[in-house]
Amino acid sequence: MRILFLLCLAPTLLCAQTEGYRIETIPNPPEATSFDVTGLDIATDGSVYCATRLGEVWVLKDEKWTRFTEGLHEPCGLLCETDGSVLVSQKPEVTRLVDSDEDGVADRIITFADEFEFHDNYHEFNHGLVRDADGWVYGALNLDHGNPDSFTMGGLGSPGGLRGTFYRISPEGKYETFAWGARSPAGLGMSPKNELFYTDNQGNWVPTSFIGHVDKDSFHAEPTSLRDHPDYGIEKLKTMKPEDFAAIRKIPAVFLPHQEIANSPGNLVWDETGGKFGPFAGQALVVDLTQSNLCRVILEEVGGRYQGAVLPFLDGFQSGNIRQVFDKDGALWIGQTSRGWGARGPQPFGLQKVVWDGKTIPFEVKTIALQRDGFELTFTRPVDVASLKKPLLQANSWWYNYNSTYGSPKIDERTVTVEGVEWNEDHTIATVRMPLEKERLYHLVLGQNLKAADGSALGNTSIYYTLVKLKQADS
Amino acid sequence: MKQNLTLLLIFALAPCLGAETGAEITALARNTDAVKQGETIYKQMCFACHGMNLEGAAGPNLIDATWIHGATPGDWFKVITKGVGEKGMMAYEAVYDETTRKNLAAYILSKQEGLRGFRYEIYPPVEDDSVALPVFGSGEPIKSGEIPDALVDLSPAEMQEFSIAFKGKFLVPEKGKYIFIHQTRDGRFRMKLNDNLSESASGNKKRTRVVFDLDAGEYDMEVAYQRTDGTPHLLLFEVETPSGIKFPLSRDTHQILTTATHVYQVTDQARVVRTVLENIPHESLAVGLPGGVSFTIGRDGSIYSIWDGLFIDVGPNVSERGKQASKTGAPWFMSPKGIQLLIDDKPVDLRLKEYQLATSQSPVFTFAAANGGTVTVQAESSDPAELKLHYSLEGIEGEAQLSIPAGVRLIKEGEIPLESTTIPIKDPKSFSLSVYKS
């Protein structure tokens, strides 16, 4: 069925907005009774594949929707393969869909991996999927909720079967557990450096939602998955204290402050469009379901680990954002759902894309980099320094508890005194000196009066930098 | 304390979009003549789809807190004006002038009822019945927040052990007797509506029904809940209005009362659906055949149930968070063991490898045996009272049998039934079995 594409450009109300970017709404497949897009990828021929919570996979090609398959169990991940097949992470397994007779509909539904367990609990999502340079495919298994038969460490639970773990599958189908400690790992992302990152949702053992760097055998947050770990098990877990888990956990790379940035983040993508998406090439983007927003993420390696900042980018999406992927033209497609979990966006589900107009360089903080005695902020355009009547920015900092309590308030919140600001010659880089401590989240709020040399006001003014390690003299 | 309902609505439904229009409609809701004209129009045009009491019919309910196209009077005016073409709601801008359309929105505003502005606070679990349930605002909660769609909702806890307190407003549009019904699975519950109190103690699984005589207006409502250890959370909570309309006050009730249906019909092609099925082992697949017979096949190759008629309604499993199991038609049999393949008297350890869904062909399920070899199962049905199962084995040695659970009928009416619960297979490479409806 050919459908008319009406792009809804105007009605979107943005609280965080970035000049030069617009949100376009893609009409849902007319025959889809629900279209909660929780798996999203784009094939090499440009076809957009959407897996929905109802269990269907829809394909958009040449402005025409086709149903590729149905009957999957609430898939929460989709990955297009170069051979034309499609991988989906549905609740009981990872499945390969093959259209062997090339009629546009999958006719072979092949089990690709099923080494984990699913126990019919609604919360046992199978999030994914991303691929590394060697062809391994990665996913993550949600813990369950409200199951009296499950073992819990105070929050979500697992009756066993590798719930709360990250897995990877080789191109030949070899399955292995990759890492531990996930709670609700609703989004994965593979960086340009071939490193796995994920987001987790605030809850017990997750003080606020975060982005974590996942390497082999790492442990991240929720201890429940360790019931299946050969070195732990339920009896040992029962004897362990929060400080024991703190000693083995990998502190998140970027905390996403609750309500202010995210409540239930989805997946990460990196802008590898080479400038087709605007001036933030190389940076990561993270979506959030509850806030229906999109934020920029700037990561850097400090002291042998990742840490960095999150900055508001765009608000006002029509529904809860959970999946995102770039197309070859540099547009960012976003899959959406809000069923069962409320979202700011009023629509129950849908598909939108973010498009840069190709010319506007918004006046924004382009990058932030940690210094030994502060931060270096690079702006997209020269700043009218002479017009600054107030300090460039104000700062405060805090940290979070790590224990079985649901979420954490900001603890030990303090104002940070800005000791000085130096500008480079063309006023695009400000070096801000302030006292720094490790394991603190720094919130920098730039002055509302900040103007570019051409008089433009700064777009987004908040930066949240998670400082896990201080920068040493030689780093 | 009861206050003016319309004043409350100004707060509760403060318009965000179309602010001026929304404010105007809010003012009109205090104007008796405007509301009366709106009511007249409603009862001429709108009741057919939305119900005479705005309770919903083909169109959605217009008095609760659930709104598809926006929750503010300004949003309603926009829908009345422009319609929702794909849902069959016509645009009334060509039918009624602007004032009439605003009066219609004002009438809807005047009829709002139920919960609004509800917030929750989660506390540690209450040790035993001698300890009072938590009171909203009385302590330092573990977690707190808003309930956006005004239903008492246990989901935000996302933890096994907790107690929870709620507080918000209950809107009463007309004077009369309101019947509140609440029920838990063994847990403790308390509701307070201004000074009206109703509680159910731990261990009480029965429905509690209380009648409160209420004047029109706004009431403070507080709710608290604590489950008994080991039972799944379930809180049924609903109210019946003087008009006889029943509506949910908790999310669990909402899911049960909402006719969440999503039926898969089978016409000329077989369908395979993976979903949660009651009393069927995890991860089984539901298969509907064009002949009118359906069955479930496990990932281990066993046939767990067969039925005819309705293939499957996945509605309960794809609404809200999807906590409920999908429904099938009445089974000819349903067994946790199923029709199972045995080799040398032992079940074969099988795992689903693939299924094929070619057009105009019965689906073919291929299973890999742990010790090597494969088993394929293909089902067909040309008679709505018979399911034929075709098995093919490759690379599996030994004496094959099929284990048949009680209740499975293998012999047509009038023929001599088999006495054994296992059937020996003469040619294990390829054999068939017919199961009949009782």
Image (spheres, coloured by chain):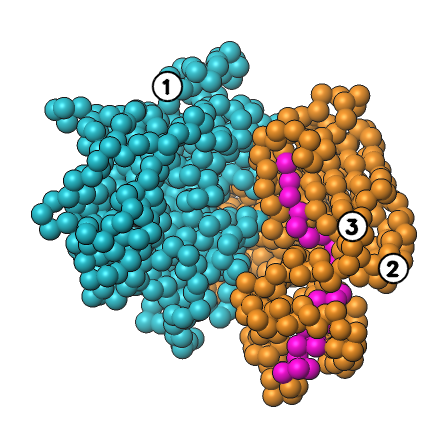
Secondary structure state at the residue bearing disc 2? loop
For disc 3, the chain is B
- The orange-coloured chain is labelled B
**Residue at x 61% of width, y 88% of height:** B94
User: Label 2 lies in what chain?
Assistant: B
Decide: is B17 above or below A467. below
Magenta-tinted stretch: B98-121
User: Helix, strand, or loop for circle 3?
Assistant: strand
The residue that disc 1 covers is: A248
The residue carrying pointer 2 sits among few (fewer than 14), some (14 to 19) or many (20 or more) residues within 10 Å by Cα, namely few
Residues at discs 1 and 2 both on one chain: no
Give residue A101's mark: none
Helix, strand or loop status at disc 1 = helix
Q: Residue extending furthest front?
A: A389
Q: Which chain is cyan?
A: A
Residue B135 image-quadrant placement: top right
